[in-house]
Amino acid sequence: MDLTHRLDGRRCVVTGGGTGIGRASVLRFAAEGARVLVMGRRAAPLDDTVEQVLAAGGEAVAFVGDANDEGCVADAVATCARLWGGLDAFLANAGSPGTNATILDQTVEEWQTVWRDNVLSSMLAIKHAGSVMGAQGSGSIVLVSSVASLRANAGAISYSAAKAAVSNLAMTAANAFAGTAVRVNAILPGLVRTPMTAKVFEYAQARGKSDRIGHMTPLRRTGEPHEIAAMAAFLVSDDASFVTGQCYAVDGGVSSTHPQGRVPL
């Protein structure tokens, strides 16, 4: 199937677009014909992402701003609409992982930070993108949650709880837009090699156990950013025109199993 033109003319905003899943999604959207406003806190990674898009013949602009700041999100949406006449897709990818402190050692400050970065940023994406999309009569909002939202031990406590809220927000927001053509869905990545998860890979490498990362998944490996980007591209495309209120695990199958050893076949 030729996907080169699947997103032709689509006007998109991607938060956290400077690295990892965000960058991979920007590159995928642009490769399929979309115009992308790439949002993030740091200018240098955003500029690098945009340069890669432009070098490949695509169209993208950088927008420095914080995804959990309402003014920044509103400005990003307004800028996209001003540049390209509307907004068709918003990928709310920005987030933070929290720490591995025990439940007894958690601090209010950590919870506030993690919930702002993950939950508040998702709500603001829905609020401001949804307003424009509702007025124009169509649009797709995709939230990046995590398999940590499903079960324990896949992420920090604060992160797991926050991502559970993000997954629920995709469902409740989809129903809030009932009667419109605005769709809201969530992607639940498993362990993916990104700057945010770098410490996991570094820890394993330092102990000579890199080959053990991802061994509990049916696919026996970790994911790559482009594999999450592929799901994001599907959800913002017309191929997903009858899909809303859903949470898709893209995790090598780990959420389908119990984490225990198996008898070899």
Image (cartoon, rainbow, N blue to C red):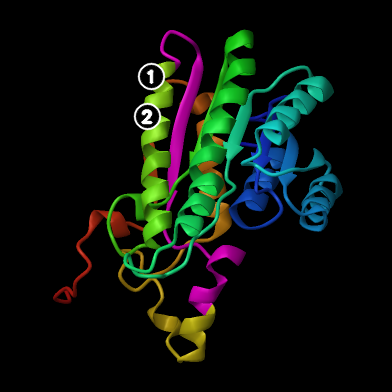
Question: Which image quadrant: the N terminus?
Answer: top right
Q: Can see residue 32?
A: no
Q: Amino acid at mark 1?
A: Asn
Residue 38, quarter of the rendered image: top right
Residue at the disc numbered 1: 175
Residue 221, given in percent of the width and then of the height, sits at: 41, 69
Question: Compared with residue 174, is residue 154 higher up or lower down, i.e. above or below?
Answer: below
Q: Secondary structure at mark 2?
A: helix
Q: Any magenta on residue 180?
A: yes
Residue at coordinates 72% horizontally, 43% vertically from top-left?
39
What residue is disc 2 on? 171
The residue carrying pointer 2 sits among few (fewer than 14), some (14 to 19) or many (20 or more) residues within 10 Å by Cα, namely: some
List x then y, in percent, for residue 55. 86, 50
The secondary structure type at the circle numbered 1 is: helix
Q: Nearer the viewer, residue 109 or 232?
A: 109
Looking at the rendering, the stretch of residues picked out in magenta corresponds to 177-201
Indicate the amino acid at tag 2: Met
